[in-house]
Amino acid sequence: MKPLDKNYLSLQFRNNIHSKDGTEFQSFFENIMEKAFIDFQKIRPRGNEGDGGNDGCRKELGIYYQVYAPRTPKINEKDAAVKLQRDFQKLKNEWDEISNIKEYNFVFNDKYDGSVQLLEEAITNLKTENQDIEFKLFLAKDLENVLFELSEAAVLDLGFNIDQRQAIENAYTYLEIVKTDLDRENTNSAQKSLKSVKAIILELNDDNLSLEYEILECRCLQKIEKINEAKRRYEDISRRYPKDPRPLLYLAEICLSENDFDTNNNFLEKAERIDSNFWLLKLEKLLRKQNLGERIDTSTVDEKIFPDDPKIKANFYRLYGLIFENSGDQTNADSFIGKAIHLNPDRFSTYLDELSLVERRMFASQDTPLRLRLSQELLSKAEKVESNFLEHGDIGARNKVNLNVKKLNAFQTQDKISEFENVSRETFDLLLTCYFDRRIEQFISGILQFVSLPNNDLNRLLEYLKTQKRRLLMISLKYLLLSLV
């Protein structure tokens, strides 16, 4: 297969790897192996007896395969390590006499994550106890290598398209997977996915695709708190792609988070000169008004003019949901946030906004029993959101801080002092890993008002503020000095 054809095929393969879990991945694996090895035999479970630790084999050669494809490989690696050893023992007990085990492959869809230390340790343990058997991890890259050895006819028969004209479309499909990871705040996975296809994207030599890739890289930088680097990259992109308003609009959003309203407005004006109807420009203008406390007339909100793309439309529903809440219209606030979640159920920030609705109502209520009920609802929902999204991977320090602040407000309402202090200490440590902007300043000052920090932590805070080199520094130092009085 030609080198370029290999890149096109790799994009399609990776799309499959990222989208398939459980039995769907097992079938995908089996289909490729049957094409690659005429003696490969897939094994179906025998009722309650199961498959005896054998999902497929090349019986005459004594080569066995056990498949495990969890939705989130990194989170489930510990379970995978247990399964690897347990299933081998089942295989040894039930299949060794049928055909002597010479090689055991644990097929793990790591989705190119590469973090398999626990599995490597399990393999080492098994090798020590079974020195006459070869043990191997069979990861996504290994299955990809098998695919690349197939004939063109076999590849086509598996449903792959090796037409070079489809390469750009495949690349965009892959980048959509990265965007979903970013919606879930699983930035580590998004970064690894981008890095794994960088060479392929560059070789495709398509300006629009390269721009999309670079913007996603910058968004990753933002989410891992490398804001200054993201700003430099956005500025560079805006110079090289002067007809695309997105770099300017992302810069405008960063400036807004820093309370730099003049620069924010400057970027918005530049973006408007490029495309006055661009959907992100409309959102950023609304965000600016909201942050400046300007009145927004909710009677003019028309859902019919929202963009058609579901994920983009969800952003409008999300923002207007908060605006309705600010105006006192709780019915439309709940409705719009609900529609945003329905259109894009992977977006972490929308669930955070849903929590904010409960939080605002808790603070606003003068009815003590109602406040307590709302505080418990806030706490329960925050824990559920955290649990659901951690299944996809780490959500980052800033998102953990946002969730913790909701919990702290609930604990304070319930007068749970011990829980409040424990979460406060955890939140303080997380805050010191975040880029210093308006939100982080608010969180720090809030903690300082309610929690007495030991001198060691106060010194850490002072050093953190010094390293940020932000004009908000003096404001935060004021809170620090007040806490010392």
Image (cartoon, rainbow, N blue to C red):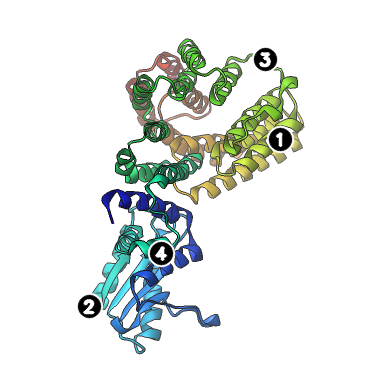
Q: Quadrant of residue 97?
A: bottom left
Q: Which residue is mark 4?
A: 80
Q: CA distance from mark 1 to mark 4?
A: 40 Å
Say the numbered circle drawn on residue 131: 2
Near mark 3 (Cα within 10 A), the count class, few <14, some 14-19 or many ≥20, is few
Rendered view: 91 above or below 120: below
Q: Which residue is mark 3?
A: 295
Q: Which residue is mark 1?
A: 334
Q: Secondary structure at mark 4?
A: helix
| Contact between labelled residues 2 and 4, with CB atoms less than 8 Å apart | no
Q: Quadrant of residue 66?
A: bottom left
* Three-letter amino acid code at the position of disc 1: Asp
Q: Which of the two discs, 1 and 2, labels the residue nearer the N terminus?
A: 2
Q: Which of the two discs, 3 and 2, labels the residue nearer the N terminus?
A: 2
Rendered view: 118 above or below 319: below
Q: Is residue 113 left or right of residue 322?
A: left
Q: Percent from the top left, x then y, of residue 99?
A: 33, 86
The quadrant in which the N terminus is found is bottom left
**What residue is rendered at 53% in x and 28% in y?**
450
**What residue is rendered at 59% in x and 41% in y?**
344
